[in-house]
Image: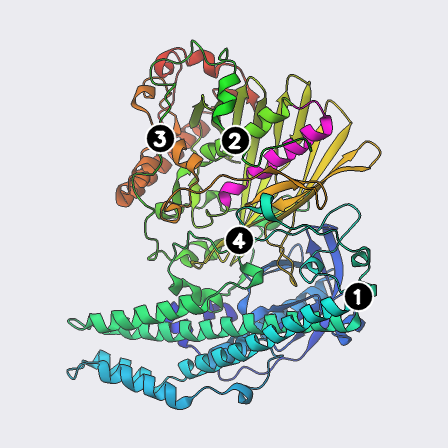
């Protein structure tokens, strides 16, 4: 029986399928190349050991023997994709995406064969005993046995609560409750977990005692090594007044050399990490047990027409879901959980049953381009909230005479018309399973997965904290200006923190959007200038600055995670000083995409240069979550002068704020504004995002019909009419396909209306806007 057939069956069948004749695979080891994106990006040689479905790696065989493991991958719980031509193997474990490459074809074939065998063996082992889904370093169950009597009592309580007039289907449910051993195993796992948590607490106490008695380095600071170019001062994710009350400490000199750390301290630290790993794996194992039982119950329900008695079944299913949600907790490696958890927890069964192996064809991403591409004056803590002060001094020369009644309004909406829809009935795996490793920009998604904004509006959302640019335009010191530009670059990511649960609408070719913010003193417009590849361009101007960018998004789905790779540059000019700044964007990754517990991560390095001056550059690093520590959402950076000397140090978190300086005199440069009430029910939108799709009646006659606010599917979704939005989305997509066929058949090349290559404004939008509704412009019908 072929391996891939295992995944072609329905989830309930997969959940119950057990292979009884899977021979235990032999241990396999050897060198492979592992891709790193930061630091030292590129391919690095590592030694891998594959044993019992676990793939461990380190720098050398000696390190493996000494126990110096860099990482461990459970291949049974991973989604594996293979690219034969490039001899690449991609493993998506949810927390991380591992890209491996083998130099020779023979070695590649051997690794693929062994990985397949070990995955099959491991998955069979998990189905047979989900408790074994934990790492093999666990202690035996005998140390922390749960009470079997308590489990039996619980089962009898549920069985006896069923009415006497049980149907055949309910009899099956009772039999399932009587015979199933999975919940017993789950209880054992939780008992193990409780015991390990006690050990963790003791280890932490010992570490603290040892730190005080031997002046050991701070445990949390050890997570990020101190270097000569970057301060490792860490921020606490739950402190809203970080600027005011954080207590900075200058790292002791010996932190830079780990060899000087106490041997006993290092040993305790390693034990702590291993124990935390055990707890994490036990919780995943317990969740897997519940997922299996839930799928068994779903199968029973689907086979029987339990009319008149569905309430009891629904109650049981709800109870299992609640237990699953309680167990699916976030440990350090995934502590930033999206509040947009809009997918049903039942889909989390794909944790391992849908951990599919995918062989990518020649038409997939292996033929795509390589992904290796690759102030310290008094700044107010609430600079980002002081929006109205800018408007008091702004020149109205840009705006006067071009807008009529209603444009200079003060009141803007503070809530969306309807909350986000329920997406528990959507099976994303069925949609995405054939697109692993591919660009998802061409894949049509259900409208419920969208948020009522599109990419053109997202570009405008990056200007939420444009006051930083206004401040830069008033700052004479070039190094301080660079710090403010860096803060603006980081601020563009803050709004994404609560938005992992949905995606923006893809603009159709020729779609536009404008935004005039008299309170912020800028006017903005954007246009979709290309469809394949999809490219969005925007232009914003004010008295103090000009901002523009063109961007293309490449979305790669790896089985459990989706990477969003931006291609393009951002540009800002400050006319007062003649400055012209350019920088790139970093990679975004949405983890746990198939479950309701998604979380978003940004990682990579931004390099900001002033092309008109070589006085300084800025390097801003969005730190990727590390296997052994929890530096979640951290940003570290430096402003360097012409001689390579560090002038300013930057640190913070992209969702909390950015700080400049060194302890204890570091100052807050930027901090995001507060979230609106009930934001979790309204797509996780910020106050600024809520305002972007608002359509003032007095603006309707002034805008082109291609403006995104006229787009019917997006408007209907915002109003909560999901069914009508879905129909309109299909109609608009079909209209776009029809226009494209017509242009191809008649050899017509599309010419953007308001931009020219390389996608800078052609300076016609605001002039043409003087005629209400762009009446003198030939506008295509998009919807």
Q: Along the line of sight, which residue is nearer the eye, 236 or 425?
A: 236
What distance separates the C-alpha of mark 3 from that of mark 4? 32 Å
What distance separates the C-alpha of mark 4 from that of mark 1? 29 Å
Quarter occupied by the C terminus: top left
Disc 4, SS: loop
Task: Give the mark, 4 or 1, whose residue is nearer the N terminus.
Answer: 4
Q: Is residue 351 left or right of residue 409?
A: right
Q: Which residue is mark 4?
A: 238
Task: Give the mark, 3 or 4, whose residue is nearer the N terminus.
Answer: 4
Q: Which residue is mark 2?
A: 463
Q: Residues within 10 Å of mark 4 (few under 14, many from 20)?
A: few
Task: Give the mark, 1 or 3, whose residue is nearer the N terminus.
Answer: 1
Residue 98 located within the stretch drawn in magenta: no
Q: Is residue 354 left or right of residue 222?
A: left
For marks 3 and 4, give the one nearer the viewer. 4
What's the magenta region?
A: 475-496
Q: Residues within 10 Å of mark 2 (few under 14, many from 20)?
A: many
What distance separates the C-alpha of mark 2 from that of mark 4? 26 Å
What distance separates the C-alpha of mark 2 from that of mark 1? 45 Å
Q: Which residue is mark 3?
A: 694
Disc 2, SS: loop
Residue 507: percent from left, percent from top:
43, 34
Q: Which residue is mark 1?
A: 261
């Amino acid at each position: 029986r072929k391996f891939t057939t295992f995944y072609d069956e329905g989830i309930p069948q997969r959940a119950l399928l057990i292979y009884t004749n899977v021979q235990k695979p032999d241990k396999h080891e050897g060198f492979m190349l592992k891709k790193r994106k930061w630091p030292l990006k590129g391919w690095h040689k590592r030694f891998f050991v594959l044993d019992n479905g676990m793939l461990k790696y380190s720098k050398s065989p000696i390190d493996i023997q000494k126990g110096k493991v860099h990482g461990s991958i459970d291949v049974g719980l991973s989604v594996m994709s293979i690219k034969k031509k490039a001899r690449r193997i991609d493993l998506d474990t949810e927390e991380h995406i591992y890209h491996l490459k083998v130099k020779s074809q023979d070695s590649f074939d051997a690794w693929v064969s062994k990985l397949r065998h070990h995955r099959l063996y491991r998955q069979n082992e998990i189905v047979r005993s989900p408790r074994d889904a934990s790492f093999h370093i666990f202690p035996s169950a005998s140390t922390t046995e749960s009470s079997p009597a308590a489990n039996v009592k619980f089962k009898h309580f549920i069985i006896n609560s069923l009415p006497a007039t049980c149907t055949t289907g309910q009899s099956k449910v009772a039999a399932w409750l009587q015979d199933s051993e999975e919940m017993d195993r789950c209880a054992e796992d939780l008992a193990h977990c409780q015991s390990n948590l006690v050990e963790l607490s003791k280890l932490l106490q010992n570490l603290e005692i040892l730190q005080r008695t031997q002046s050991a380095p701070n445990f949390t600071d050890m997570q990020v090594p101190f270097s000569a170019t970057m301060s490792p001062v860490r921020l606490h994710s739950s402190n809203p007044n970080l600027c005011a009350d954080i207590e900075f400490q200058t790292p002791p000199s010996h932190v830079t050399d780990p060899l000087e750390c106490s041997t006993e301290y290092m040993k305790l630290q390693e034990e702590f990490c291993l124990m935390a790993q055990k707890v994490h794996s036990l919780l995943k194992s317990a969740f897997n047990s519940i997922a299996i039982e839930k799928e068994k119950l779903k199968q029973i329900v689907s086979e029987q027409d339990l009319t008149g008695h569905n309430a009891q079944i629904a109650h049981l299913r709800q109870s299992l879901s609640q237990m699953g949600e309680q167990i699916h907790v976030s440990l350090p490696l995934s502590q930033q959980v999206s509040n947009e958890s809009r997918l049903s927890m039942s889909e989390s069964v794909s944790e391992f049953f849908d951990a599919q192996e995918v062989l990518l064809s020649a038409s997939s991403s292996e033929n795509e381009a390589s992904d290796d591409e690759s102030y310290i004056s008094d700044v107010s803590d609430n600079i980002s909230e002081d929006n109205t002060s800018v408007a008091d001094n702004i020149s109205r020369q840009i705006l006067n005479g071009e807008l009529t009644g209603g444009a200079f309004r003060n009141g803007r909406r503070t809530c969306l018309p309807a909350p986000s829809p329920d997406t528990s009935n959507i099976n994303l795996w069925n949609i995405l399973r054939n697109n692993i490793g591919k660009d998802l920009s061409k894949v049509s998604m259900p409208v419920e997965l969208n948020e009522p904004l599109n990419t053109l509006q997202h570009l405008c959302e990056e200007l939420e904290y444009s006051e930083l640019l206004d401040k830069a335009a008033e700052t004479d010191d070039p190094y301080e200006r660079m710090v403010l530009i860096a803060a603006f670059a980081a601020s563009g990511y803050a709004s994404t923190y609560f938005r992992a649960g949905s995606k923006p609408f893809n603009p159709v070719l020729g779609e536009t959007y404008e935004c005039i913010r008299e309170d912020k003193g800028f006017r903005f417009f954007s246009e979709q200038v290309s469809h394949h590849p999809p490219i969005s361009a925007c232009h914003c101007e004010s008295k103090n600055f000009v901002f523009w960018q063109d961007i293309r998004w490449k979305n790669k789905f790896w089985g459990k995670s989706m990477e969003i790779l931006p291609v393009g540059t951002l540009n800002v000019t400050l006319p007062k000083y003649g400055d012209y700044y350019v920088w790139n964007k970093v990679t975004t990754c949405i983890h746990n995409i198939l479950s309701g517990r998604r979380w978003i991560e940004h990682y990579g390095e931004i390099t900001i240069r002033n092309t008109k001056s070589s006085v300084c550059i800025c390097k801003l690093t969005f730190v990727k979550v590390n296997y052994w520590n929890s530096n979640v959402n951290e940003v570290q950076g430096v402003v360097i002068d012409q001689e390579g000397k560090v002038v300013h140090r930057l640190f913070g978190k992209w969702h909390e704020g950015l700080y400049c300086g060194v302890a204890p005199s570091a100052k807050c440069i930027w901090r995001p504004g507060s979230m609106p009430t009930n934001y979790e029910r309204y797509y996780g939108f910020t106050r600024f995002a809520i305002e972007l799709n608002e359509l003032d009646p007095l603006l309707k006659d002034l805008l082109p019909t291609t403006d995104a606010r006229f787009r019917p599917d997006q408007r209907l979704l915002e109003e909560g009419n999901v069914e009508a939005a879905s129909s309109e989305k299909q109609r608009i997509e079909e209209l776009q396909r029809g226009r494209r066929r017509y242009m191809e058949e008649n050899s017509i090349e599309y010419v953007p209306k308001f931009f020219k290559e390389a996608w800078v404004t052609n300076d016609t939008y605001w002039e043409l806007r003087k005629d209400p509704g762009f009446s003198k412009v030939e506008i295509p019908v998009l919807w």
